[in-house]
Amino acid sequence: MSIVITPGEPAGIGPDLVLQAAHQGLGTPALIIADPAMLAQRARQLELDITFIEAHTAPVRTAEPGKLHVHPVPLSQPCTPGKLEAGNARYVLECLQLAAEGCLKNEYTALVTGPVHKGIINDAGIPFSGHTEFLAELSGSYPVMMLACPGLRVALATTHLPLRKVSDAITPELLTRVIRILHAGLQSRFGLDCPKILVCGLNPHAGEGGHLGTKETQVIAPVLEALRQEGIRLLGPLPADTLFTPRYLDQADAVLAMYHDQGLPVLKHKGFGQAVNITLGLPFIRTSVDHGTALELAGSGKAEVGSLLAAIHQAAQMASL
């Protein structure tokens, strides 16, 4: 097993997290795609004793604490922790593309990604809405974003959309595709034979029988009924304000939220720092941290490494099934 890791935005905490994780031990063999000089400079700043081993291909067979196998990709511009540089946007995407292409060629078992800064990539003139969409386009697949922490998994019907566009995006075709991918992913990636999925409504009180909106009665409920006929265990549409309670969650394997900020605040409240972002629907395993670049913490040694270690552990666990 060999996992490939991209630290993400070099001015953020991604490099710090990779170095901190390597210092205590990644727990599984992994190859980092990054600029080794940048990593070495950051390690000195963090006062971490790390030995860097140049490795252009997998497999990496050891995960010895204090050692880091690095596939070198040079930065385009010098990097200062905490200071974004648009000139390094292409470096970030080059690392990600190399890692994903390696997964597609079966050179790596799984991909673990550190946080990127969407704004600076777009400022560089490169249209970019997120890891999930980038990897889907590269692999020609349809992604479903799911975050998981101990005791809760939340998938999203729509991801990075303005709220005014969410309702129009929720169509029978989209929901059918997302639920089938979620169901299949829970089976193949988590070993659940017959997973039970709770489905949120879109509107307050799940539309209140049509008085607060008709998306539930006209779209969501008919899709759920049709998929139940295929043998998928679905409960909903349920009001999001009561779905996230033990009465429902104790009997569920995952929740499907209709939009980003309907489900993820609950997930992050429950498990921030230990949660993992998982992309289902790709032809390879991909996990990520549950947080952003935290520029103000870069180079300080104060970044919490828990989510990266959880992402690495989750990727290894999924790869072992």
Image (cartoon, rainbow, N blue to C red):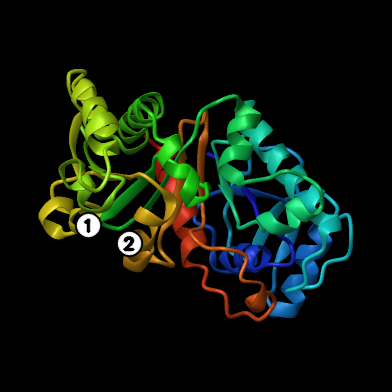
Q: Is residue 185 left or right of residue 300?
A: left
Separation (CA) of disc 1 from disc 2: 8 Å
Q: Locate residue 276, reporting x and y percent.
A: 44, 54
Q: Are marks 1 and 2 in contact (CB under 8 Å)?
A: yes
Looking at the rendered structure, the kind of residue marked 2 is: Val
Vertical side of 157 occupied by 245: above or below: below
The residue that mark 1 highlights is 244
Tag 2 secondary structure: helix
Near-viewer residue (78 or 32): 78
Furthest-top residue in view?
230
Near-viewer residue (290 or 103): 290
Residue sitting at 37 percent across and 35 percent down? 189
Residue sitting at 62 percent across and 62 percent down? 18
Point out which mark residue 78 bears: none
The residue that mark 2 highlights is 266
Tag 1 secondary structure: loop
Residue sitting at 17 percent across and 47 percent down? 208
Q: Locate residue 82, reporting x and y percent.
A: 73, 74
Residue sitting at 69 percent across and 44 percent down? 96
Looking at the rendered structure, the kind of residue marked 1 is: Phe
Q: Locate residue 241, reporting x and y percent.
A: 22, 58
Can residue 125 be spotted in the picture?
yes
Furthest-front residue in view?
211
Furthest-right residue in view?
77
Residue 268: quadrant of the picture? bottom left
10 Å crowding of disc 1: few (<14), some (14-19), many (20+)? some
Near-viewer residue (106 or 115): 115
Q: Is residue 253 left or right of residue 164?
A: left
10 Å crowding of disc 2: few (<14), some (14-19), many (20+)? some
